[in-house]
Image (cartoon, grey):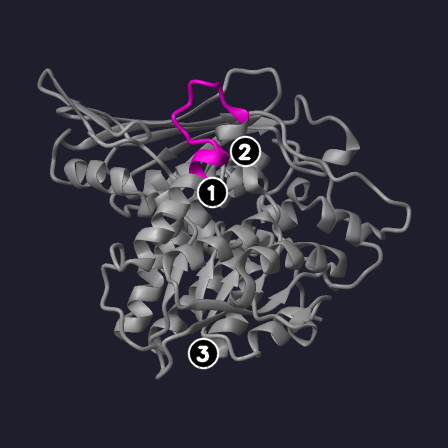
Amino acid sequence: MDVFAGHNTLTTHRLLHMRFTMPTSSTPSRRSFLQSTAAVSAATAGGVLLSAPHVHAAGNDTLKLALIGVGGRGTDAVEDAFAADKNTKLIAMCDIFPDRLEERYEPLKKTYGDRIDVPKERRFSGFEGYKQAIDCGADVILLCTSPGFRPLHLKYAVQQGKHVFMEKPHATDATGLRSVLESVKLAKEKKLSIVSGFCYRYDAFKRETMKRIEGGAIGDILAMHSTYLTGDLWFRGADPKWSEMEYQIRNWYYYTWLSGDFLVEQHIHNIDKIAWVMNGELPIAATGMGGRQSRTDKKYGNIFDNFTVVYEYASGAKVFSQCRQAGGCYSDVNDQIIGSKGTAQLQQHTITSEGKTWKHPGKHSLGPAYVREHIELYGAIRAGEVINDGERSAYSTLMGIMGREAAYTGQRITWKQMLESKQNLQPKEYAWGPNPVPTAAIPGQTKFI
């Protein structure tokens, strides 16, 4: 049976670390983000931001979208799509839970009117609903479910000849990741575009900073320290009417098979920035540690609340990656890069070299990065060109899984081991009812598969 689940974590996407960091964080508030998005929408409507030629797509100026996963990130993706291109409309929606589907449909319809063209016959739920939504005639599929289901949904969308926007991360285990790589390869053969939700890659300030780093501004990369230290997350409670499977999907963040653990679901933004700084060079091995110090209650499933991972590179460079989700603690989201000629703070868009410091002169805002993802996707489609983030973003996801497994097992995990891992965290059957899962990992006892 096929699977689907809604992804509803504003904190890990739209807000990134804002909700859980100190007030001095440079990340914008939800209100300021919406204001900046509105400005982008107005500019786009006036023809200002679309950098790619705006030509007809498949003989029709309207690009039709289907949304799979109507949680917070999914509905935000619709808003981003509408801000990016005035000639887009939503024609199908799917969520595993009918109540969430209807709950999210009404506000979208009220806000966007005719651009939400989703009558009841094109609103789907249940484990097979994603196929029905993808088959409704959309040009672009927005994959915004919890990550465990991404490989299956991407595979079907590409098989059906659809362009895809897929949220990060792209899998929760190596088996799923290999499926994603196969789908990415097929998409290239079919000349289909895939844009990933690693939004920092689309942030203008970080692009400019990275352009200077890649140009040698700080010399050879020697080391990097990347942090994502944040606070507590949501918990949706329990209901005696829910089966074990439903309980897990409604509280998906706390189950490794669904989220990949928070290193893979949230800190993966930093992991992708690490891959960017290392110019796509893949680590040869990782060692790590982590555990559950504050998440001791059974309601927190089987994920950790802290990780420290060290990635090793053939060049001798090392990357130190730390993440934590715990209330009442110091918060910090940063990426410090140490080079042979200087240093850089990627999150702050500063470079210091030879006694001089460069800082991006503009006012930082993440808002346009979320919209820019969609601008470049639809621009490529309309121009008859292909944009495909798939392989790059899949390897970033695998780096996250590699770090998690190093911490879970307490072993040094090589890239080759990770690529060949037989681990498959997905249930044997996707159906309402029992769904036993392993207890939280114990380093030194949990085995690498």
Check disc 3: other Cα within 10 Å, few if <14, some if 14-19, many if 20+: some
Circle count: 3
Residue at the disc numbered 1: 400
The mark nearer the N terminus, 2 or 3, is 3
Q: Are marks 1 and 2 in contact (CB under 8 Å)?
A: no
The residue indicated by pointer 2 is: 407
Sequence-earlier tag: 1 or 3: 3
Residue at the far left in the pictured view: 354
Q: Is residue 50 magenta?
A: no
- Say which amino acid is labelled 1: Gly
Could you tell which of marks 1 and 2 lies nearer the N-terminus? 1
Residue under label 3, please give it: 161
The residue positioned 61% from the left and 23% from the top of the image is 326
For marks 1 and 2, give the one nearer the viewer. Answer: 1
- Nearest the camera: 138 or 174? 138
User: Is 347 displayed left or right of 166 in the figure?
Assistant: left
How far apart marks 1 and 2 lie (CA) works out to: 11 Å
Q: Position of residue 233 (x, y in %)?
A: 63, 32
Do we see residue 5 in this rendering?
no
Q: Relative to 38, is 213 above or below? A: above
The amino acid marked with disc number 3 is: Gly
